[in-house]
Image (cartoon, rainbow, N blue to C red):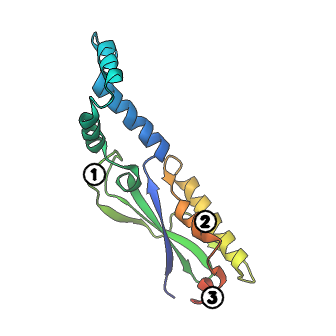
């Protein structure tokens, strides 16, 4: 019996909103240096000419880690069917401590991140999709301080022939 892979769910260090909030706070700290004598003057100059620090801001964005979408991924859950079960192999960055970085090396971590979920009879589209969604929720619970981006999955999930995809490997 072979694994039938059908989707990879990216795992992020933190959510998009949290990342951009932290990045903006870092940029503000670097430009205005809060708590120093020249802070108000720097803010006034920036308000008078918003393009004044444009190049410096772009540099700080790049140095901080760039865009969230691809640079903050720290792992992937590769969803697959094994017989009548939904499982997910877990690949994560090879690091003791997860921090923002632009260089990553992914390694195989687990043959199943969460306990497998059995697809209920009669193996229709609803039963298969319910099992897949349950497995994804279980994975979210196994990685509580991480953000699983299911947005792409959610866009296509209701449009796939889940029963056909599942039965092809039985």
Please determine whether, in this image, residue 46 is positioned above or below residue 51.
above
Q: Determine the secondary structure under disc 2.
A: helix
Of all residues, the one furthest to the front in this rendering is 48
Q: Which residue is mark 2?
A: 135
Badge count: 3
- Where is residue 130 shown, x and y percent of the image? 69, 69
Q: Which residue is mark 1?
A: 102
Residue at 49%, 86% in the rendered image: 2
Residue at 50%, 72% in the rendered image: 7
Q: Where on the picture, by quarter, is residue 75?
A: bottom left
State if disc 2 and disc 1 touch (CB < 8 Å).
Answer: no
Q: Where on the picture, by quarter, is residue 30?
A: top left
- Inter-mark Cα distance, 2 to 3: 18 Å
Residue at 28%, 9% in the rendered image: 37
Residue 46 located left or right of residue 136: left
- Inter-mark Cα distance, 1 to 2: 30 Å
Residue 161 located left or right of residue 98: right
């Amino acid at each position: 019996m072979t694994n039938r892979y059908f989707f990879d769910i990216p795992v992020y260090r933190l959510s998009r909103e949290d990342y951009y909030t932290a990045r903006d706070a870092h940029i503000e700290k670097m430009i205005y240096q809060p708590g120093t004598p020249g802070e108000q003057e720097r803010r006034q100059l920036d308000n008078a000419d918003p393009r004044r620090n444009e190049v410096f801001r772009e540099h700080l964005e790049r140095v901080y880690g760039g865009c969230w979408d691809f640079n903050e991924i720290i792992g992937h859950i590769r969803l697959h069917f094994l017989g009548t079960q939904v499982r997910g192999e877990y690949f994560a960055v090879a690091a003791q401590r997860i921090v923002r970085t632009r260089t990553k090396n992914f390694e195989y971590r687990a043959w199943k991140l969460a306990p497998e979920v059995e697809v209920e009879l009669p193996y229709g589209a609803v039963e298969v999709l319910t099992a897949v969604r349950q497995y994804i929720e279980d994975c979210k619970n196994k990685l509580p301080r991480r953000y699983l981006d299911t947005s792409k999955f959610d866009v296509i999930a209701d449009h796939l022939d889940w029963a056909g995809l599942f039965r092809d490997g039985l």
